[in-house]
Image (cartoon, rainbow, N blue to C red):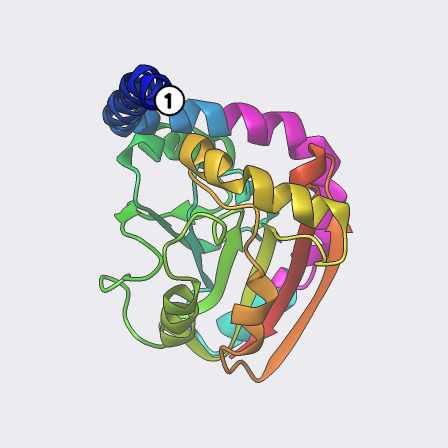
Amino acid sequence: MPRILNGWLPTCGAIVAGLWILSKVFNAVHERVFPMIYPSMMDGITVNLAKDLMPIKRDLFADLPMLQQRATRSGDDFTVLEIGVGTGANFEYYPEGTKLIPVDPMAGFDSYIDSNAKKFSHINVQKLVLAFGENMEEVADDSVDVVVVTWVLCCVENVDGVMTEIKRVLKPGGKFYFMEHTAALRNSWTHVLQRLLNPAWRKMCGCSMTEETWKAIDKAGFSKVQYERFNAPLSWTIKPHLVGHAVK
């Protein structure tokens, strides 16, 4: 037994040390490279899925013109704040004359936002606010009519904190629209697979497959919440989605 241990212990130690070094190298490369490739990666994903998701987004944003009319009747701009605006994939759904405040923590999206702002010139896109959804201190209290979040809450550190900020910036009666990929139902094989793969997925892609986003929305204290589940045209583990709206 001692001879066996003497043979295995150095081998195991070398493997552990090698894995530790690889982990450190991966983390260092990931921190430098990911912010550079992520905007381009997201642009490709959103372009490929645009047609498939168009009917769902049209239904989600169908009453924006009505909200705009209500805002403009009182002499105010119709102001939409989009958290995690990314490449600007939602610009085409906003009514003409919308004042859009884009919020994102990654400056690398700036060129994509500028490009889509020119493409969809019917809206007035403001300067990008570089901020996380949990801390949008540049945006005043009770200042926006609508907040939009799509494919963002899976990436944030504190979903409850984002809910608090959304309620803070929304005007009384303002509306929060969301579409997110979420955890599958707990009694499903998809949920089991999500939990198994999530640590590696989070490290590689920067988001979580196991967020039960509806719980944070339900407990946030909105006066009205309405949502439904659907399966998006994506790979098995990120098919489960939640789409809906909430009113402050």
118 or 201: which is nearer to us?
201
- Residue occupying the point 43% across, 23% down: 40
- Residue occupying the point 28% across, 23% down: 13
Q: Is residue 187 left or right of residue 72?
A: right
Bounds of the magenta segment:
43-64
**Classed neighbour count for the residue bearing mark 1: other residues with Cα under 10 Å, few (<14), some (14–19), many (≥20):** few
Query: What is the secondary structure assignment of the residue under circle 1?
Result: helix
Check the image and report above or below for 20 versus 127: above
Q: Is residue 101 left or right of residue 6?
A: right
Check the image and report above or below for 53 versus 73: above
Q: Is residue 234 within the magenta segment?
A: no
24 or 34: which is nearer to us?
24
Inspect the image, locate mark 1, and give the three-letter code of the amino acid beneath it: Ile
How many discs appear?
A: 1
Query: Magenta stretch mostly in which secondary structure?
Result: helix
Q: Position of residue 7 (x, y in %)?
A: 32, 14
Res 208 visible: yes
Q: Position of residue 66 (x, y in %)?
A: 64, 68
Q: Is residue 61 within the magenta segment?
A: yes
Location of the N terminus by quadrant is top left
Residue 185 occupies which quadrant of the picture?
bottom right
Q: Is residue 60 left or right of residue 35?
A: right
- Residue occupying the point 43% across, 74% down: 75
- Residue occupying the point 50% across, 30% down: 119
Q: Position of residue 12 (x, y in %)?
A: 34, 22
Res 69 visible: no
Q: Position of residue 26 (x, y in %)?
A: 30, 23
Q: Is residue 161 left or right of residue 213?
A: left
The residue where tag 1 is placed is: 37
